[in-house]
């Protein structure tokens, strides 16, 4: 159980993160752990180090794998209450979220982001590699900082602001508010 309107922070340095919405005031964390080892004992040691932890402090909730290990990865599937405000910090791995009711903030180094049916604002901050971004049915503003490869946006009701580079294709459909793209040599407002 977690508090109503909790602020959930997810830190996943190596592995994919998938977020869905559940009913009630609970958080459910499922982990698919992968270990690259030469023996069962080494694999068990990696699995023990990777085991995810959930820490609740007031209305703040922190979800992250254990101390981690460079010889493994943890793919997290997390079910959160619809009213939760979610922040994801991803190192190497994709972030997928659907149905969130209070927006999402994603800080990613390497990996793609796929969002659908998000109520509230979306902030995406990228460092490192180029990322594929898709966002569909976002009811709030969408802010993107950093470089992306392919950008696919549809049914966005809020403002769209991108400050970075687009190295692939950019597709936007059914955008209800202003669009501001600031890329090298171009400042485009629609």
Image: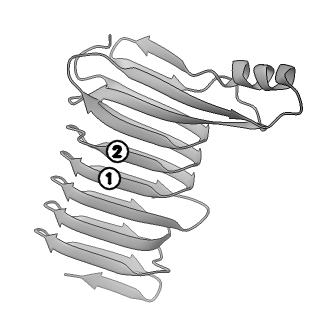
- Relative depth, front residue between 80 and 106: 80
Measured in 3D between alpha carbons, the distance from the residue under mark 1 to the one under mark 2, in whole angstroms, is 5 Å
Q: In what quadrant of the picture does the N terminus appear?
A: top left
| Residue 184: percent from left, percent from top | 47, 84
User: For this view, does 50 lie left or right of residue 113?
Assistant: right
Q: Which mark is residue 115?
A: 1
Q: Which mark is residue 1?
A: none
User: For this view, does 110 lie left or right of residue 187?
Assistant: right
Q: Look at the image and tell me whether residue 38 can be seen.
A: yes
| Residue 67: percent from left, percent from top | 70, 24
Look at the picture and state if 28 lies above or below 73: above
| Residue 107: percent from left, percent from top | 48, 48
Residue at horizontal 57 percent and vertical 59 percent from the top: 127
| Residue 174: percent from left, percent from top | 13, 71
Residue 65: name its quadrant: top right
Colour scheme in use: one colour
* Residue picked out by circle 2: 97
What is the residue that sits farthest to the front in this orientation? 40
Residue at horizontal 33 percent and vertical 70 percent from the top: 152
**SS for tag 2?**
strand
- Relative depth, front residue between 30 and 146: 30
Look at the picture and state if 70 lies above or below 43: below
Q: Residues within 10 Å of mark 2 (few under 14, many from 20)?
A: many
Look at the picture and state if 36 lies above or below 29: below
Q: In what quadrant of the picture does the C terminus appear?
A: bottom left
Q: Look at the image and tell me whether residue 178 can be seen.
A: no
Callouts 1 and 2 close, C-beta under 8 Å: yes
Q: Residues within 10 Å of mark 1 (few under 14, many from 20)?
A: many
Mark 1 or mark 2: whose residue is earlier in sequence = 2
What is the residue that sits farthest to the right in this orientation? 38
């Amino acid at each position: 159980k977690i508090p109503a309107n909790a602020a959930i922070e997810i830190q996943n340095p190596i592995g994919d993160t998938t977020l869905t919405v559940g009913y009630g005031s609970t958080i459910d964390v499922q982990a698919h752990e992968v270990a690259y080892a030469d023996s069962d004992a080494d694999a068990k040691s990696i699995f023990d180090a990777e085991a995810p932890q959930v820490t609740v402090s007031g209305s703040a909730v922190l979800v992250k794998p254990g101390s981690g290990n460079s010889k493994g990865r943890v793919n997290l599937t997390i079910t959160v209450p619809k009213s939760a405000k979610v922040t994801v910090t991803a190192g190497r791995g994709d972030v997928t979220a659907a149905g969130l009711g209070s927006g999402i903030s994603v800080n990613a180094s390497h990996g793609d982001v796929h969002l659908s049916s998000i109520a509230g604002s979306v902030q995406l901050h990228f460092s490192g590699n180029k990322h594929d971004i898709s966002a569909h049915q976002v009811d709030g503003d969408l802010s993107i900082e950093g470089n992306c490869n392919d950008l696919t946006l549809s049914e966005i009701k809020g403002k769209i602001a991108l400050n970075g580079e687009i190295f692939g294709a950019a597709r936007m459909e059914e955008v209800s508010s202003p669009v501001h793209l600031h890329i090298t040599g171009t400042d485009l407002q629609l």
